[in-house]
Image: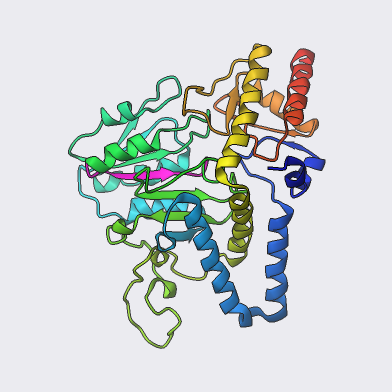
Amino acid sequence: MNIEEVRKYFPVVDELIYLDHAGVAPLSTRVVGAVEGFLQRACEGGGIFTQEFDQEVERVRDQAACLIGAHPDEIAFAKNTSEALSWVAAGLNWFPEDKVIINDLEFPSNVYPWMNLKEIGVELKIISASDGRITPEMIESQLDPRTRLVALSSVQYQNGFRANLEKIGKICRERGILFCVDGIQSVGAIPLDVRDEKIDFLAADGHKWMLAPEGVAIFYCRRENLELLKPVSVGWKSVVKPREFDRIDFTLRSDAARFEGGSLNIIGIFALGSALDLLIEIGIEAIYERILTLTNYIYQEATEREIPVLSPWGKGERSGIVSLKVPDPKFVHRKLLTEKIVTAVRGNALRLSPHFYNSQAEIQQFFETLEKLTTRK
């Protein structure tokens, strides 16, 4: 990876030190070019380019599948992670006293869809994390014959803890329990294979590590589960022959596109496609290696400066997120913004989340600025 060449795609580096990719990521010039290209075509001819646009949608579906080790017919496009997780929660045929297991580290998107099942008698079991971790053993200890589904984030948004998806997926598959993953904090940054990790459902919005705009997400539904999951909303594109408008035949498609219903966010999908192209060109393994180099540098600098790192740092636990314990993190976050350094505050800690195009020089500048700000305060 030629970092200096890659950085040219991200003009944000000329104005800001951007360390909040776990929040909303800046866009590359390639994504902007893809959007402009779509708008120009739509301006020139509108609907005459429908076939061309549809072809691009399917190409991006292929790219999304490639990114997570799925088959294209297992991928649907959603508005966001919340919508995709809600498809699972609302689409399964639940029985009274079924149990769903989550944990107390989850972002609300992976909590509320499961809480919403209470009125039909589904029990929500919330596991308490230990030292910022949710381990396979902790989940396994809570499984019983009533457990229908385990919902888990691949990476926890507050402290960056990376779950052992492969081991948890194996435990669930052996017991016939569905495994639903919120992948928004890992897809685009960390290698992930839905087959190897025995994931049944996965949702991930594009606006974080995939470096795409808000408003478009990928949803994976394991082919064997398609008939288990009833579409909660259907439309003209849910059926086998969607372009035959004068022929009513309510036969659902046999692939995950049945969940899409109607017209898609084509401009968002064009943008997502360009973002995924860049990630795949560079390679997720190389991206993850680069991210680990940067987060390790953050850890070393923080340790030398006696700044506590709240993120779990054991083997296999690291991600692109590092949370630091600093005095009055909200004050520090605001002051850093005035110095054109973008971070976030989560869980009463200062959260850093660099991507592959960030540099060690930027991280060094962050720590030097942080030291000045905390000393001045």
User: In this rendering, would 113 be left or right of 121?
Assistant: right
The one of 242 and 173 positioned closer to us in this rendering: 173
Q: Is residue 326 visible?
A: no
Residue at image point 42% right, 59% down: 71
Residue 272 vs residue 242: left or right? Answer: right
**As displayed, is residue 77 above or below residue 172?**
below
Q: Residue 300: x percent and y percent?
A: 64, 18
The residue sitting at the bottom extreme is: 246
Q: Quadrant of residue 137?
A: top left
In the picture shown, does residue 191 fall above or below 103? below
Q: Residue at x 79, y 15 (%)?
A: 376
Residue at image coords 67%, 12%: 304
Quadrant where the image shows the N terminus: top right
Across and down, in percent, residue 194 comes to: 40, 48
Q: Nearer the viewer, residue 202 or 122?
A: 202
Q: Magenta stretch containing residue 53, yes or no? A: no
Q: Give the residues drawn in magenta, as a range.
A: 175-185
Q: Quadrant of the C terminus?
A: top right
Q: Where is residue 234, by image quadrant?
A: bottom left
User: Residue 238, how many percent across, how many down?
Assistant: 40, 71
